[in-house]
Amino acid sequence: MRRLAVIAVNAADYGVSQKRERVFVGGVRVDCGSLRPFPAPTHSFRRLVWEKWVSGSYWKRHNIPSPESGTKSRIEQSILLEFEATGREPKELPWRTCRDAFSGLGEPVLGFSPSRHEFRRGARAYPGHDGSLIDAPSKALKAGTHGVPGGENMLVDNGGRVRYFTIREAARLQGMPDSFTPSGAWSQAMRQLGNAVPVQLAEAAGRWIRSCLD
């Protein structure tokens, strides 16, 4: 006899700089352990909204001026209205953004880079493929069966310019350490990374499995 659980998760809620929504199915034999609650989220979008538009600590952390009239989504505007009404400060850590993940990398280089932080030409946005905003978690990285999809592997800066993620940036979005270097050309490396489970989310799942077996 087994106990089963189906858990829907968003990697961004566990410290990944990527909005990667997945479903975990877990089970344990009754004579081996018991199912416990999946680890609670540690990060939240609400906290990111607070640090951007209430405390301003997000911009201070990156040593850049706070936008005078930053563009806010409808969801952000709704959350801000709630903050104004309640004054409650979210206690979780903020969602990590692309800017957070890429801190210290600098601009991509032309030509070969040992760290694989290399500029790749040809990025363009079109309907349904508009890239990831720099001050938000990225969209889910993907590894297409017929090639790497461009829209999910592009960065959009605050000026609206787009470029492809470098291999090093994609690895950071998946939580990989800089000591890890995927092999192969850009498309091959992006396939490897797009099929990976983000490190922080894998750690949370591993802790959950271990607790069930205890």
Image (cartoon, rainbow, N blue to C red):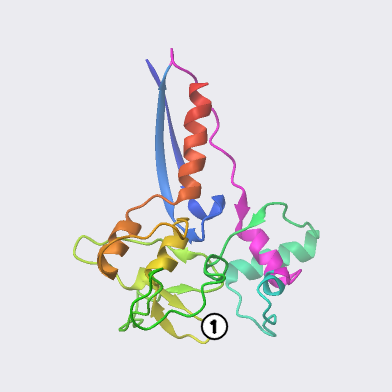
The answer to which of 200 and 36 lies nearer the viewer is 200
Residue 27, x across and y down, in percent: 40, 27
Q: For residue 124: magenta?
A: no
What amino acid does circle 1 point to?
Asn
Residue at image position (66%, 66%) is 49
Q: Residue at x 67, y 59 (%)?
A: 47
Magenta-drawn segment: 30-57
Question: Furthest-left residue in view?
Answer: 146
Identify the secondary structure beneath mark 1: loop
Q: Position of residue 166 (x, y in %)?
A: 39, 72
Q: Check the image and name the residue furthest to the front.
A: 114
Is 38 one of the magenta-colored residues? yes
- In the image, residue 113 above or below residue 207: below
Q: Quadrant of residue 52?
A: bottom right
* Relative horizontal placement of residue 101, taking residue 166 as reference (left or right): right
Residue lying at 29% horizontally and 70% vertically, measured from the top left: 186
Residue 114 can be seen, yes or no? yes
Q: Quadrant of residue 87?
A: bottom right
**Nearest the eye: 165 or 53:** 165
Tag 1 residue: 158
